[in-house]
Image: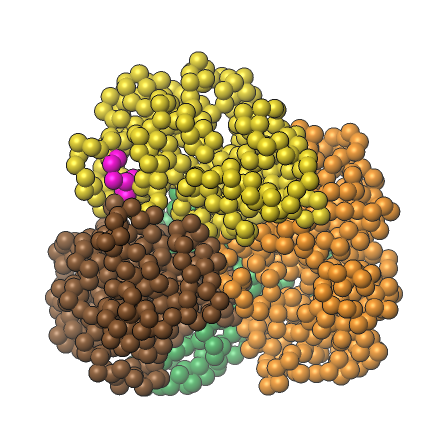
Chain colours: A brown, B green, C orange, D yellow
Amino acid sequence: MAMNSASAMARIAILGATGYTALELFRILSRHPTARVVAATTRQTDRPLISSIHPSLTGLFDLSCENLTPEEVGSSCDIAFCCLPHTASMEAVPKLLHAGCRVVDLSADYRLRDPASYQQWYGHQHTDAERLSQAVYGLPEIFGPLIPPASLVANPGCYTSTSILALAPLIAEGLIDPQGIVIDAKSGISGAGRTPKLSNLYSECNESVTAYSIGNHRHTPEIEQVLTDVGGQAVQVAFNPHLMPMDRGIFCTIYPRLLRSGTQAELLSLFRRYYAGQPFVRVVDHIPATKDVAYTNFCDITVRFNRDQLVVLAVIDNLIKGASGVAIQNMNLLLGLDQRTGLLGC
Amino acid sequence: MAMNSASAMARIAILGATGYTALELFRILSRHPTARVVAATTRQTDRPLISSIHPSLTGLFDLSCENLTPEEVGSSCDIAFCCLPHTASMEAVPKLLHAGCRVVDLSADYRLRDPASYQQWYGHQHTDAERLSQAVYGLPEIFGPLIPPASLVANPGCYTSTSILALAPLIAEGLIDPQGIVIDAKSGISGAGRTPKLSNLYSECNESVTAYSIGNHRHTPEIEQVLTDVGGQAVQVAFNPHLMPMDRGIFCTIYPRLLRSGTQAELLSLFRRYYAGQPFVRVVDHIPATKDVAYTNFCDITVRFNRDQLVVLAVIDNLIKGASGVAIQNMNLLLGLDQRTGLLGC
Amino acid sequence: MAMNSASAMARIAILGATGYTALELFRILSRHPTARVVAATTRQTDRPLISSIHPSLTGLFDLSCENLTPEEVGSSCDIAFCCLPHTASMEAVPKLLHAGCRVVDLSADYRLRDPASYQQWYGHQHTDAERLSQAVYGLPEIFGPLIPPASLVANPGCYTSTSILALAPLIAEGLIDPQGIVIDAKSGISGAGRTPKLSNLYSECNESVTAYSIGNHRHTPEIEQVLTDVGGQAVQVAFNPHLMPMDRGIFCTIYPRLLRSGTQAELLSLFRRYYAGQPFVRVVDHIPATKDVAYTNFCDITVRFNRDQLVVLAVIDNLIKGASGVAIQNMNLLLGLDQRTGLLGC
Amino acid sequence: MAMNSASAMARIAILGATGYTALELFRILSRHPTARVVAATTRQTDRPLISSIHPSLTGLFDLSCENLTPEEVGSSCDIAFCCLPHTASMEAVPKLLHAGCRVVDLSADYRLRDPASYQQWYGHQHTDAERLSQAVYGLPEIFGPLIPPASLVANPGCYTSTSILALAPLIAEGLIDPQGIVIDAKSGISGAGRTPKLSNLYSECNESVTAYSIGNHRHTPEIEQVLTDVGGQAVQVAFNPHLMPMDRGIFCTIYPRLLRSGTQAELLSLFRRYYAGQPFVRVVDHIPATKDVAYTNFCDITVRFNRDQLVVLAVIDNLIKGASGVAIQNMNLLLGLDQRTGLLGC
């Protein structure tokens, strides 16, 4: 599809090409004017065509998935997206960086700055702990200026982005109690990945709502770390994820305790000021639906204030703004491009 | 289907036979050994067969829906289920009672004891206010002994039942702060009824999660009234409903503030003691899914306690335990039957 | 739930208790007045409670799944339902029968009379070929009188039942060309079973329609065998299954070539005569929807005749009339009960 | 979003802006480099913002929907998309053309050349019959060269496009019997439009498959007219639409009678030759799923040939290739652009 000259093209690699976040990266990159996928990796050794793994990509990419080493990938591309599981990423990333490419890591391996926290929540010792402090947390609306010069971007978790974007203005202004913030999150099933398990079978998930990891989900420390950065004092959240019978979308309903008085209109104004100039956050008056942002990189947010209870409501598409869309946004910043390129407009 | 002798049969009427709660009453009654539907009403005047309104009932009921007056219905049946919209119910109920039948009202008209509260939340003056104090709130697990002698049972709202059952043991024991209890409720779309509106179209609801009436839903005063009865001190909740892309099911995630220390195991024991002998409440160790109770009259409840945050999780089928199943449970109690009849076992 | 005396109870075993057809058998049997599940088997050796495998059965069955041999099962029960995969069934069935119980086999192992056909379509040599001629094909609407005295009932496939019921009256009367009958079948995902595979993941199936085994699905010879029995001359069908994004339901659209002239009304009358007295076949004037029969043992059928093309439309619930419901219907006949017991009415 | 100079921009109007096809036009046009929406019409007179009608467009279009006359629209834009219901279109189109703009009509009003056929199938006399012969049928893969010079393009129906693309190569080569071609079509619910009706409510459609207009759907004469043009002899089809519980997607399973012998591989080759150079038709070896083409302008097609039965399988997204995507493809051709602009690549 590329109509631009090859010389201007950034060379892109996708490690772990068989999952949903990789598919979504391919879809977005098929529309990107100055980035070109030159390598896709898998552990399979039979060099399957990408269209045999993802039939929807037929005709869009004429590329085989190969069992390449990180060194091979790193020496032949400018930017590598790591769509590997956690622990696999921290093995590949040092080699990719050493070989000379920059990395957007979609796993959790470089999101937490504290290796002890990583060990506590993920149950593994971090094998690349010294690099944790160099990784930039890839939420452009919060850490935008840090991203362009980075070598390694830790792409945020899907629940995390939504929660942070919904709370950052309130935390930054010190308007809410930073302790005991209840986050009730609802996600579509694609967040569970493409590996077959009983819990992500159609007949188990369809026509059903359930919850999991109540109070102890791994995105908890990530939300707390970033919001603590934003507000300058320790934030503690009660994060509770639920599964909804739909492909994609996250809806976060958040119940902070307001410390000062304020009206709904004032709070909406605060959010609008905080996100002024951010192309992918839409502060809206109506209550958003996940469908409003499906297949887009938008995060829609509103607030409600009734009977002394503040509620913040925020939605994203978990595969786009929650994973591959923000990853492209980060790639654009790394490449010195307008962050909207390939994501919005033409 | 009736194989029993007609003489033992209770004569049942269903007012407002075209909606989903009426359909569900018909389905359950097709299995009930000692109740027989003798009348079904509609405002349509062409006497449609019930099977033309609800094709799934073909062969199960050989009955026409007629434009009968409440007086006609009341004089020819023992128990009338009112599946009318609010305000329509309070016109029909006095006439039904006066004609000599007993009533299970599935509308909201007789649920709030205080006519001022009714006016505040429903925007209509109550025209049968003096009867509000006589109506029994039809949640058998809480008000069981009051139901058998009643003439008028106010069948609870779907969100209400779930919320009350999930909180009653904690409120009764005084374990939680009765103020500011956050209830995050998720419902399937059938709760929105069968009247065509943009907001309940397939293409609007499918693949989407949204919220509505944040902090000001009409079930709020109902939950507060009953829990105040249970605990003996004023309860105030922040009730927040969401719509899930599925037919049926309610999932309530509730965030109370625990006043004393306690373990998860102790709290589960408390719930098990409180609901001992109740056939339709199952206190479970696992996190329930709405699918576990779909097409049943069960309410499954569990609790989680992590990082000082208590969470109560409860599920029902909104059309059964949330409407027509509990209505049959109430009917059974009115008729002096085992409350499980037609709902559980054979 | 059993309220009847144990002495009158038939002792039931379910082999392969972890799948969806087993779950559905349990659900129906929880309402059956004279059958009681006494054994459930699994290859797991840790004796899991049935409620830990199927949380929806909590409180309904206090039973562990055990790794029992067919001999142990057969000697302690009256009727065994085999919910094992094909080839596993033909190992267990001879032992069950020899131990003295009767068997309703939900696998494909005893459906085809011709062992060569079994080998051709299933790719395995049949190891119990001599018993194929003794098995009765368990479609009561066609083979009803043969079932009560049988020892071994081969429960039909889900697509098969629907296709046969939709075509039998036309074939029996010789009204249609028995060759080249096009059957376009649409099924919910539960038909794919409960074993995790990429093809039955939520995120693969949801919001998608596809087809598989076009022209070569294994239910083809089964449909042809039974319809050949019905009509007395060789029937050949082009059977083409599709997957629909829903839990349960089969919709068959069938395109026969009418050999004589006839009106739609005459054809409907023919169907009504053919199924007179059959409680589970409803010949309807309207076009049925799978939802009309969901969670029931009904098969709804109609015909349309426009521009010289006859179309037969038939729906069932694939887990009930297509598997576990008809299995209970067969069990009832084996036990000398009304075939509706536990399935319809009270 | 427009980054190009306004001078090069085609001025676009959308009549009937509240429905799903209009929404989809907006979405695609938000990415189109050289087309700019300058007017959107509705019968509402309160000038609602387009983002209040379609919240997903928030921030993408700063435009009010106005109750404009066709004359006002026609004189201020280059191309008008008519998303009006049939009969409303044939009132507006003559005025739009007279005012000087070109029209892509998404209704059925200009698809049939014969006004008698229009009257027969739509039940209305055509009030602009003389223009029927001037309208070009907007299926670029078949009538591509006729579109660039046209003033009025009749955008095809969704079922129609799929059926025609799946049959044209076989009809053009005279390989199949042109009479009695069975088309079994499955559509998502968005095809039913955005006007609330009982039949498109979530709780009616979800978890259900049904059929409608068996043998007499209005797309029948449209399919027959175009395929008759393609093959030069009268084509007659038995077209049978079904509703699937999903938002978008059409799956057509087509059963032609092959007149000559041929292999599956030869037939696939024929399709590939016929569609060589067409960017939006992908002839694939695997059986496609509607999900493969969701949110794209692709039509994926394959064939299967088993036991003497040829089956053609084709999928599209009904709102894109079946409506608004092909409408943009037509607009591109009218404007002298690459037909992929805004639809594929960057």
Q: Residue at x 80, y 78 (%)?
A: C95
Q: Position of residue C177 (x, y in %)?
A: 78, 39
Q: Does the magenta stretch mainly form a helix, a strand or a loop?
A: loop
| Picture layout, residue A38 above or below residue C171 | below
The one of C210 and B107 positioned closer to us in this rendering = C210
Q: Position of residue C124 (x, y in %)?
A: 74, 68
Q: Residue at x 66, y 74 (%)?
A: C16
Quarter that holds the N terminus of chain D: top left
The one of A81 and D295 positioned closer to us in this rendering = A81
| In the image: residue A224, left or right of residue A245 | left
| Picture layout, residue D13 above or below residue C143 | above
Q: Position of residue A9 (x, y in %)?
A: 25, 55
Q: From where the camera sits, is residue B244 visible?
A: no
| In the image: residue C97, left or right of residue D104 | right
The one of A5 and A126 positioned closer to us in this rendering = A5
Asked if residue B326 is among those painted magenta in the image, a careful observer would answer: no
Q: From where the camera sits, is residue A144 visible?
A: yes
- Residue C37 sits in which quadrant? bottom right
Q: Which residues are magenta?
A: D29-35
- Residue B213 sits in which quadrant? bottom left
